[in-house]
Amino acid sequence: MRIGPSHALFIDFDGTLIDLAPHPSKILVPAGLSETLVRLHEALNGALAIVTGRPIAEIDHFLRLPHQIPVAGIHGAEIRVAGEQLGGPVAQQALAAVRLIAEELAKRHPALFIEPKPAALAVHYRAAPELAGPVHETLAQAVAAHPELKLIRGHAVSEIKPAWADKGRAVDRLLTTPAFLARTPVMIGDDVTDEDGFRAAMRAGGCAIKVGTGESLATSRLPDPGAVRAWLERALSELSAPGG
């Protein structure tokens, strides 16, 4: 599809903008990506946001974008828009209780990686995919005692986050802010957690682009992050052209 000046872009990070890596800290940011995002943000008059499971601080570290570019982090548990930080209630005591159980599991299975976040907790099993079932079952039992939390699955990861936060609500919230008002949303993502964002974009009259394989609500596809980056560069070229 072609991006025009009346669109708004909502873009996932891992597996969408960036190729997945064996460890979350080992990703590689291609040269020129941040500049492309900054220029697209300008070409769309501010209607571009990164919508990710990572904390905003990590996006700042990897992409080094100006703070006026909106970011929804931790599946929307934290949102920065127009330089202002938004958020909601975080059940820190419940998260701490679940973290103890996750850490006990990791002691028995050293291949697991526990990733604490400001408002969430992720347990990665990319190095031991056979542990997917036991990890998710253990965390499901732990989260059952805490209705303020929700367990979700991603690419080789199980994650606990606030029950109220998801990428769809993040998209909905951003669509109420000045830069995104009255625009046609386009959500791009690769994971199960992006489906909420797809649903929100389509509900608002926009569309969704799924990266990679697998079932999805999205009606358009791109094969991998490299294709996403090429698509964004083409979009920038078209928006920058006379009459674009």
Image (cartoon, rainbow, N blue to C red):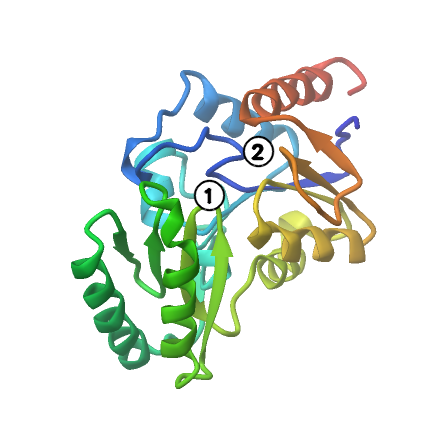
Quadrant for the C terminus, please: top right
Q: Quadrant of residue 39?
A: top right
Q: Pointer 2 and pointer 1: residues touching (CB < 8 Å)? A: yes
Task: Give the amino acid type for the residue marked by disc 2 in the picture.
Answer: His
Q: Quadrant of residue 47?
A: top right
- Foreground residue, 208 or 24? 24
Q: Which residue is mark 1?
A: 68
Q: Which residue is mark 2?
A: 41
Image-based side of 217 in relation to 17, left or right:
right
Query: Residue at point 21% right, 64% down?
Result: 103
- Foreground residue, 189 or 201? 189
Q: Is residue 183 above or below residue 109?
A: above
Quadrant for the N terminus, please: top right
Query: Residue at point 43% right, 59% down?
Result: 133
- Foreground residue, 125 or 1? 125
Disc 2 from disc 1: Cα separation: 9 Å
Task: Give the amino acid type for the residue marked by disc 1 in the picture.
Answer: Gln
Image-based side of 106 in relation to 57, left or right:
left
Residue 216 in the image: state x and y as whole percent. 71, 47
Residue 208 in the image: state x and y as whole percent. 73, 43
Q: Is residue 129 above or below residue 242?
A: below
- Element carrying mark 1: loop
Query: Residue at point 50% right, 35% down?
Result: 15
